[in-house]
Image (spheres, rainbow, N blue to C red):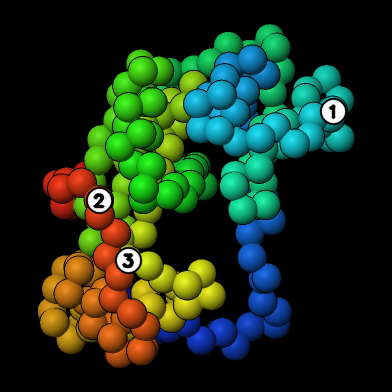
Amino acid sequence: MNDESPAPVTSELPDAPFHTAGTDHITVWGSNEADTIAFYRDLLGMPLVLRQPNLDDPSQTHLFFDTGDGRILTFFVSDDRPSARGQRAGTGAVHHLCFSVDPDEYEDIMAALEDAGKGYNVFDRGIFHSIYTQDNNGLVIELSSDKYEIPDDRKGEVLATAQRFREEDGADFAQDRHMEAALEDLGLPINKYDLPDADAGVGV
């Protein structure tokens, strides 16, 4: 048991030698180019914005996709690698990738996944609403929509405030009432998106 108090949850910048300015890109070991483009460009709708050799290993190709807000997802691919069925879990492994989607397109997204033969699950995660599916290599892909309208530059502040209300409430996880209390506490309007009913997904 660790007797030390847990690290505080806050949107304030920590006392660190420097601070990151955002996510620039994430790079994944991919399979082949055709399968990767078929999933990320042709199904998820991410533009392929750059293709060049992997500068550390020119025998591989480096694909760059725009995830929708100018932030980039890249893959190292090689035509001699078939798509895989699943991922190996373990320390340092990627559990899943999550991409934001428009709440107004939720039903269309589920229909598109069905048309593409992709299985999926839908969960209400308390602070957001999520569709889970898998890419061509079995990597879990989450397509997430905020349940409430939150300015991008206030999201961390809203979540940290919801955390405070959750702890005061003694709840196991942040729920609608904590999010609404946080928005009200911060003077932000409470605008909830119309999303489909879904299981809470606790323990999944």
Q: Residues within 10 Å of mark 3 (few under 14, many from 20)?
A: many
* Disc 2 from disc 3: Cα separation: 10 Å
Amino acid type, mark 1: Pro
Does residue 73 appear left or right of residue 143 in this picture?
right
Q: Give the residue pinned by disc 2.
A: 195
Asked where in the image residue 86 lies, by quadrant, the reply is: top left
Image quadrant in which you'd find residue 81: top right
* Residue displayed at 38% across by 26% down: 112
Which of these two is toward me, 110 or 125?
110
Q: Earlier in the sequence, mark 3 or mark 1?
A: 1
Asked if the residue under mark 2 is in contact with the one under mark 1, i.e. CB atoms within 8 Å, the reply is no
Q: Nearer the viewer, mark 3 or mark 1?
A: 3
> Residue at the location (23% across, 82% down)?
181
Q: Nearer the viewer, residue 80 or 7?
A: 80
In the picture, measured across the screen, residue 141 lies left or right of residue 6, that is right
The answer to whether 77 is drawn above or below residue 16 in the figure is above
Mark 1 and mark 3 in contact (Cβ < 8 Å)? no
Which of the two discs, 2 and 3, labels the residue nearer the N terminus? 3
Q: Nearer the viewer, residue 187 or 25?
A: 187
Name above or below for residue 30 compared with residue 204.
Answer: above
Mark drawn on residue 53: 1
Judge whether 167 appears above or below 105 on screen: below
| Image position, residue 32 (x, y; %) | 64, 17
